[in-house]
Each structure stands twice: as structure tokens, then as C-alpha cells.
Amino acid sequence: MSDINTLRRRLMAAAAAGAVPAAALGLAFPAHVNAQARPTINGGKPFRIYAITFRGMTDVEKGFSDHFESKKIPVEITYRDLNRDMGRMPGFLDEIRATKPDLIYTWGTSTTLGVVGPFDAVVPGKHITNIPVVFTLVASPTLAKIVPDMKSSGRNVTGVTHVGPTEAQMRAMAQYRPFQTLGVLYTPTERNSVVVLEDIRRIGKEMGFNVVERSFELDAGGRPIGEGSAKFVRQLKEAGAQWLYLPPDSFLGSLAESLIIPAAMQAGLPTFASTEQLMQAGALSGLVSRYYNVGQFTAFKAEQILINKANPSDIPVETLKRFSYQIRMPAARRLNLPPPLPMLSFAELITTEAVIQ
């Protein structure tokens, strides 16, 4: 949390110095300007990046910003936050068309689809096609139809995925504790979560395990609500689930520490995290990538576009080369599920209680 607060203080300092348009305040996080930028890059004029986040600032944005600062690349980043409300997107798209930034940064599947649309269903006049887009924190870019192929998007888009291959996650779970039935709790309005669940169903048929699932309820406005979350976890346990898989789901992530994982612990149901955030919320184990490193890698792709003038369609969509297999030992002790001895040779053991950022 301190890292995020530090970033916010930096951003507020930039605002106080006049680096932020007044219109940016209130709607979103203010712009950040790298004051130490090398004057030889872009004539010392900062590249303008318009960044849309889904649920506020994370370590991904810190890594993204720090990459430019460390390389002394002049950037001005204007942050806009959807606050999980896609109804804000049209206003952001209007602002993009009016300000014509050099590059757009999008966080998450829903956000990215809102900006660029599916590759086979782009709507002229609605989606952005004439400004380079670099996405991050997208679980499955091909299944979500953001790109047809990881090697080339075929359009003005590239980015970084943060979730390990679904099959690798399933095998990592089985290596810790073999299972015949997997429980999944997800948000039906989050594309990230839906496409991963579809992949799990397919893999379950191939690997020979059953999938039982529950989805969060929606209110009259179509927004997910947390009511009944603990009940859903118990239902999954009663349906025979031997693991509770936590997909890359922002709404689930907001409830993981306070409701979902405590309910699973009470039911004696081990949890497997697909993201660093969910691991920090207290999951037993997970195959995860560091959000900060994901942000830096995303900035590297943006640098290729801004500095090297690379065409986004020529820049492959990639994930980090390494993932961390993490095990939270206090949770393992409470569940009486010590990791197999061979796993101790490569797993990262977390000895502290959950601390979500």
C-alpha cells in the first residue's frame, strides 16, 4: 500500500506544479511528467499517454511509470479510472478523440475491449483505431478476441498478459493436491473471468476433472453484488469441490480477503490464486506474476512504439517469462495441507498472513 501512496503523492505533486489539466482532477488520477527526461528524446517534449484503469491504481501503474523514469523517457500520463463502471467509457473515448494522445494504455479485458473492440467486430466511430493501444492485465487476449494471434494483433494494438497458461495452473494445483472436482466463483460481467472459465471447462474434459461453478449475482443495473458470496463458497464445497480456483476477476478480488477466502478457509476448501492480488489476499497457493514487473514490461512495449516507432501489429503480445509458484504457509497449516516435499525446492514460501495492496 505504501508504494501506491508514494505514487499518488508523486502524482499530486505533479498536479501542484501545474503539470495536470484541471479537468483531470476529480475524474481520475492526475498526470505524471518525468521531469528528468533526456532533452534529446522527442526534442524534450513529453510523449502523451492516456491511461484507463478499471479499479484504481495498482502496482502495474507504478511499474509502468517507473520504467519511463528509469530510462529518462519524457512522458505525461493522464490517468482515467472506470471504477468498475463501463458507463464511463464513452466520455473517456470522447476525450481521447479530442486530445489525440500519442498512445493509449488500457488495464484489463473489459477496458481494452471498450477501447478497441473485438478484432472481428470493430465499430467505426465507437472504437479507437487511429492511436496505438498497449494493454495490460488481460488474462486471455485471444479468447477475448482482442487479438487473433499472440504473434501479431493485425491492428494498432499490442500488450501484455499476466496470467499463466490455464493448463499450467491446473497442473500446479494437482501437483499440490490431486483433485477430481474444481470449484470456480466468478463475475459473469467480467470478460477476463468468463474466458478463463471457458478454458477451464475445456481443460477439465481433457484432464478428466469436473467443474462446478457459481457466479456473483447482479443488481437491477447489471452490476455484481457480494451478497451471498460465502453461501456460494459453501455450495461449491458441498458440490464436491476439492479446490476453489480464484480467476483473474476484479470484483472477486475486491471481496477475496474479506469474504471469499475466509469462507473457503472455514469450509476447509483450499484456494488457488491466478493473480498476485489474489495471492496477497490470503490464498493458499498460486502461480502468479508480479504486477510491478508486468507494468514494466507493458511500458517496454510502449517504448518500442514511442521511441523505436514500431508498428503495434509487429510487436507480439507476451507474458513474463517466469511465474512464481507461491504457497502461504499459515494457510497450509490451518488447512492441514502441507505442500509435498519436492515442491519446497522451487516454490516461494510466504510465511506472513495476508496483506492485500
Image: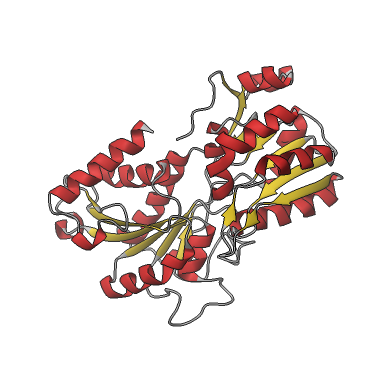
Task: Identify the image quadrant of the N terminus.
Answer: top left
Q: How many marks?
A: 0
Q: Residue at x 65, y 28 (%)?
A: 284
Q: Position of residue 340 (x, y in %)?
A: 74, 20
Figure check: 297 above or below 240: below
Q: Residue 223 lies in what quarter of the image?
A: bottom right
Residue 124 spot, x, y in % from top left: 46, 82
Residue at 35 percent across and 34 percent down: it is: 3
Location of the C terminus (image quadrant): top left
Residue 104 point in image, percent of width and height: 37, 63
- In the rendered image, residue 67, in percent from the top left (x then y), is placed at 33, 44
Is 229 placed above or below 25 here?
above
Q: How is the image coloured?
A: secondary structure
The residue nearer to you, when weighing 168 against 79, is 79
Q: Looking at this view, is 213 or 259 the one in front?
A: 259
Q: Residue at x 29, y 71 (%)?
A: 100
Relative to the observer, which residue lies in front, 354 or 342? 354
On the question of residue 48 being in view, the answer is yes
Left or right, 251 with reference to 41? right
Q: Is 249 left, or right, of 108 in this rendering?
A: right
Which residue is painted at 75% across and 38% down in the image?
234
Q: Is residue 339 visible?
A: no
The picture quadrant where one finds residue 148 is: bottom right
